[in-house]
Image (cartoon, rainbow, N blue to C red):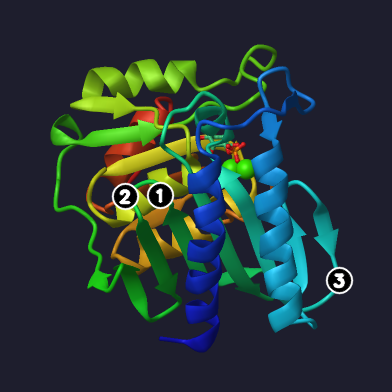
């Protein structure tokens, strides 16, 4: 394995032990700007350990961390989501992950999504495939939306922003086998890569949410675009559609009912 990727896998697993230990024990739950956007002491402790680990190993690299913001200037940058699924964690629901992305010149090249409760580590390298604990990952072979199991998420400003995904949720719930809402974007994407879901979409995500996940999906043979079909997923905040490829056009059509997509 690429030594940087091995480093990221080891670090995520090591820090994952803290989240596993802290599961069910969060006592300091605060709100960020949006009234439903939470942060716990474990988000902060996890981030500190991840940042320290990266600083020690790669002092030249820049860091973009969800809670602490960015530091350093470099072509090499680590995007850190220290606890993806904070709301689940704070409520004692065991669905959350650490998401680490290593980007070169703004493009994810290595990514790790580690689930401390199921002890599953998903990782990918640009051009090197997507893996789950040593097993190569492939997206599902579902060809029709009708037979698809989908997953989505809702933005934290759902109460105040009319573009809140409820319309898309309603449309796709009627056209698929089901739409899940797990509450951890990095795991949603990892599960598309693993073929557990056939497609995922979400509005207004940040690089620390999707960096590793889009690499996983692409390396597992899937397709990623913006929700309107555009390819520039870097224009922030990102709206993302990630699928097994086979249902991409059908999902684009369902998400953009006034437009038709060729494929
Ligand atoms: C959130 C989760 C959630 C998604 C939100 C994300 P956080 O990340 O991934 O599933 O719907 O858009 O912000 O705040 O738990 O790291
Ligand atoms: Ca997140
Ligand atoms: Ca987070």
* Badge count: 3
How far across and how far down the image is residue 229, in percent? Answer: 46, 46
Left or right, 225 with respect to 173, comes to: right
Residue 234 vs 165, above or below: the answer is below
3D distance between C-alphas at marks 3 and 2: 33 Å
Tag 2 near tag 1, CB within 8 Å: yes
Report crowding for label 2: few under 14, some 14 to 19, many 20 or more residues within 10 A (C-alpha). Answer: many
Residue 109 visible, this orientation = yes
- Residue name at image x 81 percent, y 53 percent: 69
Q: Which residue is mark 3?
A: 72
Q: Secondary structure at mark 1?
A: helix
Q: Is residue 124 above or below residue 242?
A: below
Q: Is residue 237 visible?
A: no
Q: Position of residue 214 (x, y in %)?
A: 46, 58
Task: Name the one closer to the observer, 226 or 257.
Answer: 226
Q: Give whichever of discs 3 and 2 has the lower sequence position.
A: 3
Query: How far apart are the two marked residues, 2 and 1, measured between alpha carbons?
Result: 5 Å
Q: Which residue is mark 2?
A: 192
What crowding class fits label 3: few (fewer than 14 Cα within 10 Å), some (14-19), or many (20 or more)? few
Question: Outermost residue, right direction?
Answer: 72
Instruction: Specify whether 122 is left or right of 154.
Output: left
On residue 244, the disc is none
User: Which disc, if any, is residue 189?
Assistant: 1
Q: Secondary structure at mark 2?
A: helix
Label 3 or label 1, whichever comes before in sequence order: 3
Q: Is residue 248 above or below residue 139?
A: above
Element class at badge 3: loop
Question: Disc 3, disc 1: CB below 8 Å?
Answer: no
Q: CA distance from mark 3 to mark 1?
A: 28 Å
For the N terminus, the image quarter is bottom left
């Amino acid at each position: 394995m690429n030594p940087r990727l091995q480093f990221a896998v080891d670090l995520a697993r090591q820090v994952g032990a803290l989240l596993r230990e802290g599961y069910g024990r969060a006592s300091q739950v605060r709100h960020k700007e949006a009234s439903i956007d939470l942060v716990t002491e474990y988000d902060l402790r996890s981030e500190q350990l991840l940042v320290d680990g990266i600083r020690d190993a790669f002092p030249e690299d820049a860091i973009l961390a969800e809670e602490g913001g960015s530091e350093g200037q470099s072509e090499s940058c680590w995007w850190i989501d220290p606890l993806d699924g904070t709301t689940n964690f704070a409520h004692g629901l065991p669905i959350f992950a650490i998401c680490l992305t290593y980007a070169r010149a703004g493009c994810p090249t290595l990514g790790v999504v580690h689930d401390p409760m199921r002890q599953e580590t998903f990782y990918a390298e640009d051009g090197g495939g997507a893996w789950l604990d040593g097993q190569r990952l492939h997206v599902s072979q579902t060809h029709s939306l009708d037979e698809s199991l989908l997953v989505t998420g809702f933005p934290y400003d759902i109460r105040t922003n009319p573009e809140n995904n409820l319309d898309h949720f309603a449309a796709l719930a009627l056209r698929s086998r089901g739409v899940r809402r797990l509450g951890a974007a990095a795991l949603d994407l990892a599960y598309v890569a693993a073929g557990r879901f056939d497609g995922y979409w979400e509005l207004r995500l940040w690089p620390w949410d999707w960096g590793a996940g889009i690499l996983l999906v692409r390396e597992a043979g899937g397709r990623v675009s913006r929700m309107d079909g555009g390819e520039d997923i870097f224009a922030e905040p990102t709206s993302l559609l990630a699928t097994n490829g086979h249902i991409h056009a059908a999902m684009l059509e369902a998400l953009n009912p006034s437009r038709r997509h060729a494929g």
